[in-house]
Image (spheres, coloured by chain):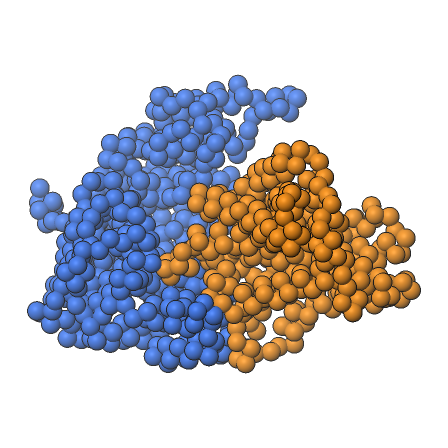
């Protein structure tokens, strides 16, 4: 590697930014050397995306300093960042699907004729040059973006980013939706871009890719940068160790867990969700009173498994057997009748009716028991909500208050109360404590453990490893819609889970090879 | 402060705040100010005759608006109610002029035929838009044309008339100066209020408008509730058709043009959110009164119908702007 030039192109010193009480960036420092490929890695929520948004002028920062070419840099808007030569290719595409490739590439500065009309000729020529520059000569610039595959859309987005004068190209998880062949092509193109002197910042969850194409890597954890290393000097397990942190706060589950001979409550065989295009399903068993965790990165297919079991989405294939009886679940209604409950990932979009009173939210699943012949029995509804609230230590003003008036933790308790009202024997939970403060988290863990001790079985999907380690009896780790491994409580470690989640099934062998 | 102002809850536990009262009473207050102004500005406004007039005039719009409230509460819209009303009237008109039946049989037959015709249109609107998850705006725009065309086809573009005497009498009958047809509309308001506030069905109508996915995941059949909301709207168009026939003694295939817009206006002025999930049928009642009183009062003041139309338009826009602020404060 030729990284002799000591003068960095961009430096970031002790950057801080918080949203509400949450420190998204809590001391971020790193620098970019002109012409390098620099990887940013870290768990979900470690601060990578926030940093990119600050650099690209979407967010402002509260403290710290950024310099570009030795001068203070503080982009006030995305446009200002673009003018300074910083281009971002976001995880979600920003393409206009019904316009042509050429129109998309030139959208920021459409060429005009002297009469002020759109100069199609110049626009198409311009787009041709831009696409040829990254080796995309097989794409027709007049074709609508909708007609292109995902990989090509990604590359069109890159071509657009490079269209204007760009010095730094930031790619936020560019390979998340690509096949291996497409990824290789992207890397070819990126190395050509790099050769032209553009600095590439690469955010990825795939360490193979990071080690395959980057010169240096900066690791994020909890809003801080932990280390910046030359790729040549580190190994993937080193990077994983940085991401996890050396001091693992072991607040392990001390509850007894299910009896070793507990009956099988749920058996899932060869389940293929609609999002799973691999053709291979997953299978697992859940014992009575067991809390089973599912770990994995975003996009690993965890939520899809819960939704398929619950009938919220159809499944491609698979068999679900509960208490020895094979189930056909057509929709949530069947699942509820079969004794399932589903605490969804996003309580605002899927869990709660925010404008409605607490009592009305709590009774939504089990309206039958607060009504007679279709007429609501408000006294019974209040009684049930009071009882459910007391059981979950819910803090509220009045049951008639809108649920939106509650704190995140108490809102989540209302979601729980809603599902517990129908007395399920299997509870599916997707990110059960997201956006919930530490105190309420501990309370919710306690409640869930009590329920498990009473014989309720649970499947918990979580991106927070400490949560899985604290709460569950067993963890499945998923990546690419497959189960990469199963860990028992005795063998829990954040490192082990992350290694599996990052597809580093056998890291030691790989390094020695 | 609760944002649940329009959402049915048991009143004993509802916390009252001055702002909540002002917000709920806002529309009523606007109506009272309007009535006060016209009473001073025109000596005829509060006369028994004119009150009877106003009540008669708002009846049809109120009935259509009650049905529309259900559809808007689930986040939909029904542009077809005017045409469906005409179609139902033509169907009922054909039934009531059949030869060989006694007047009582004919009236029963016509009422059933008219209500069925309206309800079937509503079921189609709801089933098509809910099954394929299509915007009800487009589907009911289609129904607007289909029902209008069907009405013209069946009637041969002719107005149908000469109904049994008892039927005509019902249309013009007064009880203590109050038109019976208005009492029918008012009782529909009461029934709708009861359904929306006291039944599981009503609870889920609000729920679907607020967060359809949450209701679906709670195991409720969202499709069925959507179809039901649209069929209630169609049924109300059928009821409006019968009232219309009884009042005017004709069934015209070109009746009801533009009525959907007045019905939507009444619902929106009444504080129901076009986004769904928030509003009340009591608001709709007040909204229909505001439109009716405004029209009547402006005519008494000697203003042209064109000016009246402009002012009604302004009132709709102002009502929506006020609702925007109300939603914002309620959210904070």
Say whether residue A504 is left or right of residue A226.
left
**Position of residue B68 measured from the top left corner of the image (x, y, whole percent):** 60, 54
Left or right side of A506 for A96? right
Q: Which residue is located at x 81 percent, y 59 percent? A: B53
Q: Nearer the viewer, residue A26 or A290?
A: A290
Where does the C terminus of chain A fall, quadrant-wise? top left
Would you place residue A27 above or below residue A189 in this image? below
Q: Which chain is orange?
A: B
The image position of residue A473, as x and y in percent, is: 17, 67
The N terminus of chain A - image quarter: top left
Q: Residue at x 43, y 45 (%)?
A: B131
Quarter of the image holding residue A131?
Answer: top left
Image coordinates for residue A388, horizontal then vertical, percent: 37, 77
| Figure chain in blue | A
Residue nearer the viewer, B313 or A334: A334
Q: Is residue B153 left or right of residue B307?
A: left
């Amino acid at each position: 590697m030729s990284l002799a030039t000591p003068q960095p192109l961009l430096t970031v010193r002790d950057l801080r930014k918080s949203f509400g009480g949450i420190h998204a960036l809590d001391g971020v420092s790193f620098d970019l050397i002109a012409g390098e490929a620099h990887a940013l890695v870290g768990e979900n929520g470690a601060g990578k995306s926030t940093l990119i948004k600050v650099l690209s002028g979407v967010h402002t920062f509260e403290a710290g300093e950024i310099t570009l070419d030795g001068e203070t840099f503080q982009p006030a808007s995305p446009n200002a960042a673009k003018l300074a030569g910083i281009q971002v290719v976001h995880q979600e595409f920003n393409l206009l699907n019904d316009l042509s490739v050429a129109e998309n590439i030139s959208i920021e500065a459409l060429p005009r004729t002297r009469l002020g009309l759109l100069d199609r000729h110049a626009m198409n020529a311009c787009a041709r040059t831009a696409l040829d520059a990254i080796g995309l000569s097989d794409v027709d610039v007049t074709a609508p973006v909708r007609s292109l595959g995902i990989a090509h859309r990604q590359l069109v987005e890159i071509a657009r980013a490079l269209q204007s004068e760009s010095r730094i190209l930031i790619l936020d998880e560019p390979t998340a939706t690509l096949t291996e062949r497409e990824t290789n092509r992207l890397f070819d193109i990126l190395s050509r871009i790099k050769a032209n002197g553009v600095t590439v910042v690469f955010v990825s969850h795939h360490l193979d890719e990071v080690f395959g194409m980057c010169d240096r890597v900066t690791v994020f954890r909890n809003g801080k940068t932990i280390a910046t290393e030359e790729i040549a000097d580190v190994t993937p397990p080193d990077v994983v160790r940085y991401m996890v942190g050396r001091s693992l706060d072991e607040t392990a589950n001390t509850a007894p867990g299910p009896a070793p001979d507990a009956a099988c409550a749920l058996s899932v065989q060869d389940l293929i969700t609609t999002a799973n295009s691999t053709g291979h399903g997953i299978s697992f068993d859940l014992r009575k009173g067991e809390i089973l965790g599912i770990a994995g990165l975003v996009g690993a297919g965890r939520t899809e498994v819960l939704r398929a079991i619950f009938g919220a989405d159809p499944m491609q294939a698979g068999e679900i057997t509960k208490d020895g009886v094979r189930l056909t679940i057509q929709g949530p209604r069947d699942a509820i009748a079969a004794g399932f409950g589903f605490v969804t990932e996003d309580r605002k979009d899927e869990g709660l009716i925010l404008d409605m009173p607490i009592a009305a939210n709590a009774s939504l699943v089990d309206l039958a028991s607060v009504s007679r012949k279709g007429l609501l029995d408000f006294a019974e509804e209040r009684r049930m909500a009071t009882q459910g609230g007391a059981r979950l230590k819910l803090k509220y003003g009045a049951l008639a208050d809108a649920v939106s008036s509650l704190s995140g933790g108490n809102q989540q308790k209302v979601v729980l109360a809603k599902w517990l009202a129908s007395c399920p024997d299997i509870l599916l939970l997707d990110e059960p404590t997201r956006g919930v403060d530490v105190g309420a988290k501990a309370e919710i863990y306690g409640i869930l453990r009590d329920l498990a001790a009473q014989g309720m079985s649970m499947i918990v999907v979580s991106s927070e490893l400490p949560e899985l380690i604290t709460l569950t009896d067993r963890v499945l780790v998923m990546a690419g819609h497959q189960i990469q491994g199963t860990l028992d409580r005795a063998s829990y470690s954040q490192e082990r889970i992350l290694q599996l989640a990052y597809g580093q099934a056998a890291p030691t062998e790989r390094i020695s090879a | 402060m609760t944002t649940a102002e329009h959402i049915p809850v048991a009143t004993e536990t509802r916390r009252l705040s001055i702002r909540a009262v002002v917000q709920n009473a806002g529309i009523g207050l606007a109506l009272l100010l309007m009535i006060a102004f016209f009473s001073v500005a025109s000596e005829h406004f509060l006369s028994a005759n004119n009150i009877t007039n106003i009540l008669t005039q708002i009846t049809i719009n109120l009935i259509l608006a009650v049905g529309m409230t259900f559809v808007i509460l689930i986040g939909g819209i029904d542009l077809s109610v005017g045409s469906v009303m005409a179609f139902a009237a033509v169907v009922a008109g054909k039934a009531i002029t059949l030869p060989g039946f006694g007047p009582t049989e004919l009236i029963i037959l016509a009422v059933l035929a008219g209500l069925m015709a309206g309800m079937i249109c509503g079921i189609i609107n709801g089933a098509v838009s809910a099954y394929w998850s299509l915007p009800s705006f487009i589907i009911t725009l289609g129904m607007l044309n289909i029902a209008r065309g069907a009405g013209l086809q069946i009637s041969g573009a002719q107005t149908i008339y000469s109904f049994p005497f008892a039927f005509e009498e019902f249309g013009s009958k007064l009880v203590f100066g109050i038109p019976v047809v208005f009492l029918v509309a008012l009782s529909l308001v009461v029934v709708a209020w009861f359904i929306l506030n006291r039944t599981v069905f009503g609870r889920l109508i609000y729920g679907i408008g607020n967060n359809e996915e949450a209701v679906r995941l709670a195991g409720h059949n969202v499709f069925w509730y959507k179809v039901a909301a649209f069929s209630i709207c169609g049924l109300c168009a059928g009821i409006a058709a019968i009232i219309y026939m009884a009042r005017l003694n004709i069934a015209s295939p070109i009746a009801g043009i533009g009525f959907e817009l007045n019905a939507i206006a009444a619902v929106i002025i009444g504080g129901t959110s076009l986004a769904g999930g928030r509003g009340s049928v009591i608001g709709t009642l007040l909204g229909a009164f505001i439109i009716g009183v405004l029209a009547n009062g402006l005519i008494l003041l000697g203003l042209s119908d064109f000016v009246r139309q402009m002012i009604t338009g302004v009132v709709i826009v102002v009502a929506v702007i006020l609702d925007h602020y109300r939603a914002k404060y309620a959210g904070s």
